[in-house]
Amino acid sequence: MRVLLVGAGGVGTAITRIAARRPFFEAMVVADYDRGRAESAVAALGDDRRFVAERVDAGDEAAVAALLARHRCDMLLNATDPRFVMPLFRAARAAGTGYLDMAMSLSRPHPEQPYEECGVKLGDEQFALAEEWEKAGALALVGMGVEPGLSDVFARYAADELFDEIEEIGVRDGADLTVEGHDFAPSFSIWTTIEECLNPPVVYEAGRGWFTTEPFSEPEVFDFPEGIGEIECVNVEHEEVLLVPRWIDARRVTFKYGLGREFIDTLKTLHRLGLDRTAPVTVPGPDGPVAVSPRDVVAACLPDPATLGERMHGKTCAGTWVRGTRGGAPREVYLYHVVDNQWSMAEYGCQAVVWQTAVNPVVALELVAAGVWTGAGVLGPEAFPARPFLDLLTEYGSPWGMREQ
Amino acid sequence: MRVLLVGAGGVGTAITRIAARRPFFEAMVVADYDRGRAESAVAALGDDRRFVAERVDAGDEAAVAALLARHRCDMLLNATDPRFVMPLFRAARAAGTGYLDMAMSLSRPHPEQPYEECGVKLGDEQFALAEEWEKAGALALVGMGVEPGLSDVFARYAADELFDEIEEIGVRDGADLTVEGHDFAPSFSIWTTIEECLNPPVVYEAGRGWFTTEPFSEPEVFDFPEGIGEIECVNVEHEEVLLVPRWIDARRVTFKYGLGREFIDTLKTLHRLGLDRTAPVTVPGPDGPVAVSPRDVVAACLPDPATLGERMHGKTCAGTWVRGTRGGAPREVYLYHVVDNQWSMAEYGCQAVVWQTAVNPVVALELVAAGVWTGAGVLGPEAFPARPFLDLLTEYGSPWGMREQ
């Protein structure tokens, strides 16, 4: 397998470090808009035989397709932010290669009833092109990070091996990460978190289909494993709710994010004050009035999450809670994956949240390379057998867990 | 009496409207950095005989002193923001006139122990020049708005007529104002509120003197009269704590602001995110990076409080709670003054908070003009007999109240 990795930010760099330890691929071209970033990632690996750095604009379909052709790649791995999903997805199709991403094409709220009806859903633009991929016999594996990604694999595993009937599948994400010297330091981009948390959350119910709610709806306290403990979780728009019902029979599918009371209140306050807005406001500057986006100012006031790994402590947990029946009896399980920041920093020099996102696409690529995961079309992780994925993840040194509840 | 009013903003304009109904002065010169603002205030009165508009830079001592001389004023009434206290105070001394303000010279926190010890206190710079005023036989009446101002008059009234011994004097300020169409719309400058609430609050105790605490310390729920009801109040840095103990015997003096839980949480969130800072941060702009003060951005995202009067509903209450003994028995009273926004808008076209601040200096000027309040030096409102002030305030159509508790 020859891979073009687009994006050498936190997750992209972690992908190169994880992949460098595995023999399944022949070459990985690391491309970024900032060539220096790609070169740094490659230089740190000491494997000039398989890794090479390139510069590319992820928004330029033709340039990406040409790069795929020039390096004879058979797979594009997208590690950029979601704004670049569509150009990269189209470039891979144009070049005739496979495609893998960790987040899907963006949603747009319903113009009249944003908190009741779906508008354009996450992934809709990609699924609209599914027939093209099927006809070409090419694979686009979408939403294959940790969440979405591993969380969807857990859902498939539950459906295959643990339940006869499934009442509800609820992805539940929580962490107890803290950062030394900072009262408030999100471990991920505040810009993206605001976007994600203030978009109308989507819920799936059999018979009703997909619908939306107000932000922060259906709060619940979820008890996370391995000492993380109880955290308040709320509905957030996320790909799993759009992916899981396409392949798995469940009466209800939700995604709840363990933001915690303090973080929820912070986001609500930013919204109430209009500080979440991206449209510019005019403020005095040293040389007269200037226009700035309030959300950019919020981001500028906080430390850059990519630089916080060394001072971070704690664990992050991604997982899927499933409720249903087995042999006529009620059953409830939480399938999960925990990464301790101390371990990921020591082992890979990567912050826990970033490392956890990065390991799953590498595992998936290895299954595709080995011919264990095969298929054509636009497919989510739950379209493939789960057991080989979970076994290989454990082999990567990062086992998953299951709690009967 | 011939008065130079500096500042034709919300409070200055309200002062002209209140004063226009009273015959005690011969002339009032209304001066502002923005001549148009001064002209608008004067034009609205229809009294060209007594009122005249001028332009002046409040920071230019020599220009202010010249203006005082040119109009043969005997009193400077300062209705600008606290940054201009010292130049205006010095200009009045230089011109040999009297002086009255509603806020005192600014504080600076203690460099090492900001939340335990006082640094430069509110009014210190003014009191440092007290001897000059005394020697000249000139009066600087400082802190003579509503709070400080009327609250200090209440303290003096309690000491003179209601108590033998005073245990504690606590100014307590609360309102139930809401603004139609806005989830969050402070009825006063958010910039100043942040400054006031995040500065270390000051407390006075006999024997210990003045000291500071952490922001938002000693929360208590206070029940405000006339239907406003219970509001959570916290310690805030305010002039009364510095003024009252200079003239009145009390074991403890505090100022608590009825910010309410939501507003306190909002200010704490802004502080935790660094959005209260005035030092600039760099953010992307349409033409490259620009430097902006986060606090300016917060202010720019909120509606201008001066424009909200028409859509505002509710009442604001300023008052002084006193606990002590009378005739050997314990006594506790709350002396207060409530303004209903509907009344102040109908009667004066002024928002309640602004009108309540403006009426008190006019009452004080009338007492000085009549020779009822006389003195020399830098004196707070509690240095003068309280009863004539309270009676005249009632005569202005805005009676005060007292609750035994």
Image (cartoon, coloured by chain):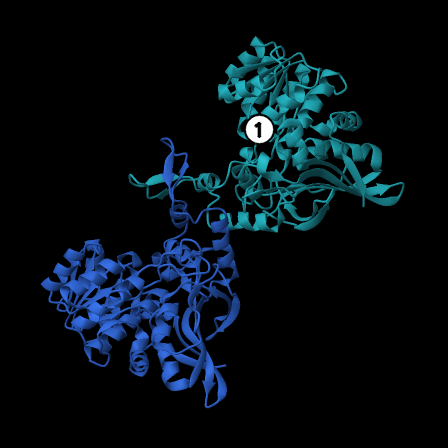
Chain colours: A blue, B cyan
Look at the picture and state if B14 lies above or below A295.
Answer: above
In this image, B271 relative to A238: left or right?
right
Question: How far from the left and from the top, in percent, is residue A389?
Answer: 30, 79
Question: How far from the left and from the top, in percent, is residue B196?
Answer: 57, 39
Look at the picture and state if B313 lies above or below B145.
Answer: below
Q: Residue at x 42, y 55 (%)?
A: A194
- Residue A41 in sight from this viewpoint: no
Question: How far from the left and from the top, in percent, is residue B49?
Answer: 62, 10
The quadrant in which the N terminus of chain B is found is top right
- Farthest right residue in view: B327
Between residue A229 and residue A117, name the one nearer to us: A117
Residue A399: name its quadrant: bottom left
- Secondary structure beneath disc 1? helix
Residue B203: name its quadrant: top right
Residue A201: name its quadrant: bottom left
Give, as a three-letter code, the residue at label 1: Gly
Chain bearing mark 1: B
Look at the picture and state if B24 lies above or below B354.
Answer: above
Residue at numbered disc 1 = B10
User: What is the crowding at mark 1: few (fewer than 14 residues within 10 Å), some, or many (at least 20)?
Assistant: many
Look at the picture and state if B224 lies above or below B2.
Answer: below
Between residue B355 and residue B247, name the one nearer to us: B355
Question: How far from the left and from the top, in percent, is residue B125?
Answer: 59, 28
- Residue B190 in sight from this viewpoint: yes
Between residue A201 and residue B39, name the one nearer to us: A201
